[in-house]
Image: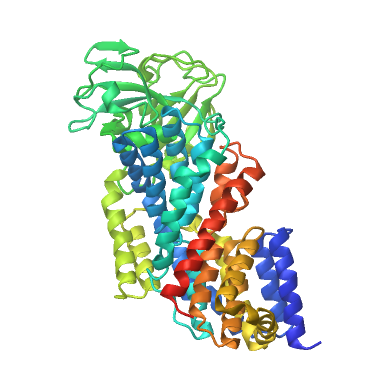
Amino acid sequence: MDPVTILLLLFALALLLFATEWLPVDVTALLLLGALLALGLLAPKEAFAGFGSDTVLTLASLFVLTRVLLRAGVIEWVGVTLARRARNAAGMVRGMLSAVAGVSAFTSNTATTAVFLPVVTGLARRAGIAPSRVLMPLAYASILGGTITVIGTSTNLVVSGALPAAGLPPLGFFELAWVGVPVAAVGLLYLFFVAPRLLPAQDAAIEESLRAYLADLTVAPGSPLAGQTLRESGLGRDHGLTVVAVRRGDQTIYAPGPAFAVEEGDTLAVEGPTDRILTGKSTLGVFSKSEQKLQVGGVAPVRLVEAVVLPGSILIGRTLREARFRERHGVSVLALHRRARTVERLGNLRVHVGDVLLIQGTPERVAGLGDHLTLLGDLTEEQRDLRKAPLALLLFGGAVLTGGLGLLPLSVAVVIAVALALALHLVTPEEAYRSVEWPVIVLVACMLAFGSAFEDTGAARVLTTAISGVLEPLGPHGLLAALFTVTVALTQPMSNQAAALVMLPLAIGTAGALGYDPRPFVIGVTVAASNSFITPLEPSCMLVYGPGRYRFLDFVRVGSGLTVVTFVVAMLVIPRVWPF
């Protein structure tokens, strides 16, 4: 059997496995690479070159830089700021979706959706909007924003990295914006005015599994809360925190009303989920006295864990102060969860069996908590520190600016930014490695190697000659529409990156065979692969699928219309910016 036939059979088998996901996509890609090596269709040096390519290094670095922005609370700060400035519910939703699209142009779609998910859900509840009306648009807005820059999605980067091997220049940093901005703008209009009419109005499930913690937070000098009433502060409306008591000097005010005015030095006993307490601690100018007295921080690693109080613990029946918990164990208790709701301050609560403590301390101190507490989970990576936000933004913006202006290759700029982030302790090395989506890295590296084999064996030429014979009567506009449609169809069952890498050589080869400039067809495939709306299999959509209590057909109904909108805009814009 000749090499071309073998490669086309492997190609068909890979398509089947990608579409059905009988195996994880990265495993399928590795098996494909192994087959190419075993059959002698690719030399080892060429097969492994993808793992050291600029594309792979850029992807890995961007995953880390996105984590740096998350840990600094930058993305959450954008969402909260927009929400506080909105004058009405509709304006809040539209402002939030626009912000999501803007943020997603420079960060991972999935990460953007994950960060905004609890923010949007809480704001929708307080605005009297069913969360199901905004969660799917949230996911779609993050996908739309990804089409604006070359780093907006990993798919864009993968396509850009594969183009030089085909003799084409890589995508410019903002080259996709010519079509991405119109697609995002029209897509957002669809999400503003059409999608809400098609979406079910039902409650969300996101908060059912969240523990409500009680925490004591003291208002620091210069805090934006000082001088505001509880109503004006937006603690409940914007931050998801309920004030159950306030201690002022020797006086404790229980269940203060909305007209209660907060002053500097007040200690607020607030109730809310851990993420809201941690975000509030970093954005509202408040602090935990327990944490401050312990002086946890600096460059030493700090863990944040949940621990449950076991029967027989020396804490039972005593307050944390009476048990001298901080002095004995060298850790601080930031908050406490109890199944029965209480209006007591944290400092006055006597610990019961089954209480869950939110504890912060060094790894050694946390590990030595003893047999009377059992760790339930590690929330270390949920901590946010807005003090690091300016530096995080400077590094990320500097990498984007130097790479976008061509002062440095983008891969060099982002690698330098990652090195500086690690040196400045904006993220730990362990967290940096965990933030990299290794299945995507493996998939991209293996498929870049497959693309080389596809060209070297002549399989690409055979396949594109056959396709061009069928599509030639359609003309350039028909060819663009056909490639766009096929790519969209492939992105539904398989990963966006795989769909783009499968279609890219076909688009370039077919355009070349018919005498067209391949650039507009490359752009069409890229936009189509980045916009996967019809099924919930896209990671951003999967994040909102359960919390929004959607059905599969909800995505088909809303996503089909958005796909048509994207298709129409792309067909109108691409030929004008990139002539055939």
- Residue 536: give x, y in percent of width and height: 61, 49
- Could you tell me if residue 129 is visible in this image? yes
Q: Give the position of the N terminus as an image quadrant.
A: bottom right
Is residue 506 shown left or right of residue 117? right
Q: Quadrant of residue 376?
A: top right
Identity of the residue furthest to the right in this view: 1
When the figure is inspected, residue 361 is found, relative to residue 354, above or below; the finding is: below
The residue closer to the viewer here, 461 or 187, is 187
The residue closer to the viewer here, 279 or 366, is 279
Total numbered labels? 0
Q: In which quarter of the image is residue 401?
A: bottom left
When the figure is inspected, residue 511 is found, relative to residue 109, above or below; the finding is: below
Is residue 60 shown left or right of residue 205? left
Residue drawn where x is 41% and y is 60% of the image = 182
Is residue 535 shown left or right of residue 192? right
Residue drawn where x is 58% and y is 70% of the image = 481
- Could you tell me if residue 108 is visible in this image? no
- Residue 174: give x, y in percent of width and height: 37, 68
When the figure is inspected, residue 292 is found, relative to residue 17, above or below; the finding is: above
Residue drawn where x is 44% and y is 50% of the image = 188
| Scheme of colours in the image | rainbow
The residue closer to the viewer here, 314 or 2, is 2
When the figure is inspected, residue 3 is found, relative to residue 424, above or below; the finding is: below
- Residue 72: give x, y in percent of width and height: 34, 48
- Residue 59: give x, y in percent of width and height: 47, 65
The residue closer to the viewer here, 115 or 83, is 83
